[in-house]
Amino acid sequence: MLFVLSLIAISFKGGPVTYGFFFFTLFVPLVSFIYTQIVYLRFKIYQEIDTRTIVAGSSTPFYFTLQNEDSFTHSGVRTGFFSDFSYIGGLDTNTEYELMPHTGIRKETLLVCKYRGEYEVGIKSVTVTDYLRLFSITFKNKETLKVQVSPRLEILNIADRPDMIIASSENPPRDKKVPDILVREYVPGDDIRMINWKTTARVGKPMVKTLTGEDTPSVRIIMDSYKYSEKPEEYLPLENKILETVLALTYYYAENGIDVSVSLYNDKFIDHKIGGTDSFEEFYAGMSGFCFRRDNEIVKLIGGCEKETVPSPSESVIFVLHKWTDEVSAYSQVLSGNTVRQTLFLITDDPAGSGSAAVPSNVGYRVVGYEDKLNEVLG
């Protein structure tokens, strides 16, 4: 507006004042624009994180420094952060900084990653605004941080759910209030998977569960490992929740002394057998770097399960899937014919659980959202 007024003034009146006003309104925006360009080229960002390996949902210290190495002030500097899969705690992301010559601002805060996977975190962009606020330039941070995020292990607190503790309705849950009546001292040659770790810790020497001649209850978890999308904002939350669910259930059964195996497909059919919390650590490490693939189709997973021995009535099958397909339904009918107890955890972002209508009535199921806590879902 000032520039237009100056043009009108020199057109109708002229003179040194009006021409001075014209050149002032002409060059000030130009100088402001050049200023933002110089700050853009000279501005320095330094950021660091305590570790590049993070557990989803946990916080880790995060530091960043905004540095002015020039002899003039950098004003109107604002940082933008990656926010799709992580967030910065305890920091106002709308804060605008002014850096005096040869000074810097260091911020110490916390970084929280929401999903398992590998992605960029921290400062994504910087916006520079000139003194008169005529121009703002937003530029991408050239040196971003990339982290490897491991899945979170949720410890299930569902002691009041005997149907979850025991693997088969044919085997009633053991009374935890009667200690040590089904354990004895460990002798060389005993299966270490039969060690009762809680009793061992209490008495100070290895104790194993005695066998009563009945079938040992066990659980088989069938995990969907198909990659449903190539967009990180779509596949990261889904894959994260599938792994969280599998890990939580696996640890829960292993901790309660119930044999558990996890069946999945990854280029070939794989059946992980976990016998206690010690072998669970190895399983967890493998799942932290697990890759979901387009080739890991459910039909291949079910085909591998069908080639395995059909579970006995003392074994339960838990499906952790994103979709209930015809192949899964056919396999479920085979299990039902062998009176195998079945449970489905349907991982979906649809709160209504679309697709659950096709689940047979003899299969108990739970719909788990991407942001749900399993303890709340099972409560």
Image (cartoon, rainbow, N blue to C red):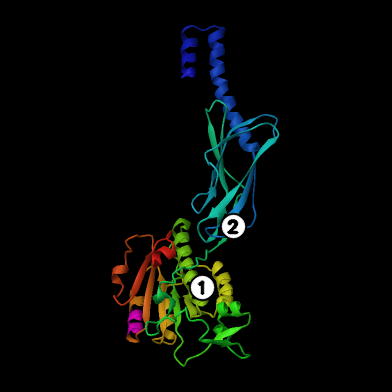
Examine the rendering and report whether any part of residue 121 can be seen: no
Magenta includes 27? no
Q: Nearer the viewer, mark 2 or mark 1?
A: 1
Give the crowd class for mark 1: few <14, some 14-19, many >=20 residues within 10 Å.
many
Where does residue 74 sit, x and y in percent of width and height?
63, 32
Examine the rendering and report whether any part of residue 141 can be seen: yes
> Does residue 75 appear left or right of residue 339 in this picture?
right
What's the residue type where badge 2 is placed? Val
Which label is found at residue 151?
none
Q: Which residues make up the magenta segment?
A: 330-336
What's the residue type where badge 1 is placed? Tyr
> Does residue 8 appear left or right of residue 122 in this picture?
left
| Residue where numbered disc 1 is placed | 251
Magenta stretch, main secondary structure class = helix
- Residue at 44 percent across and 91 percent down: it is 214
- Residue at 44 percent across and 80 percent down: it is 175
Badge 1 marks a residue whose secondary structure is helix
Where does residue 150 sit, x and y in percent of width and height?
55, 63
Where does residue 108 sit, x and y in percent of width and height?
62, 46
- Residue at 46 percent across and 68 percent down: it is 157
| Residue where numbered disc 2 is placed | 147
| 3, above or below 233, in the image | above
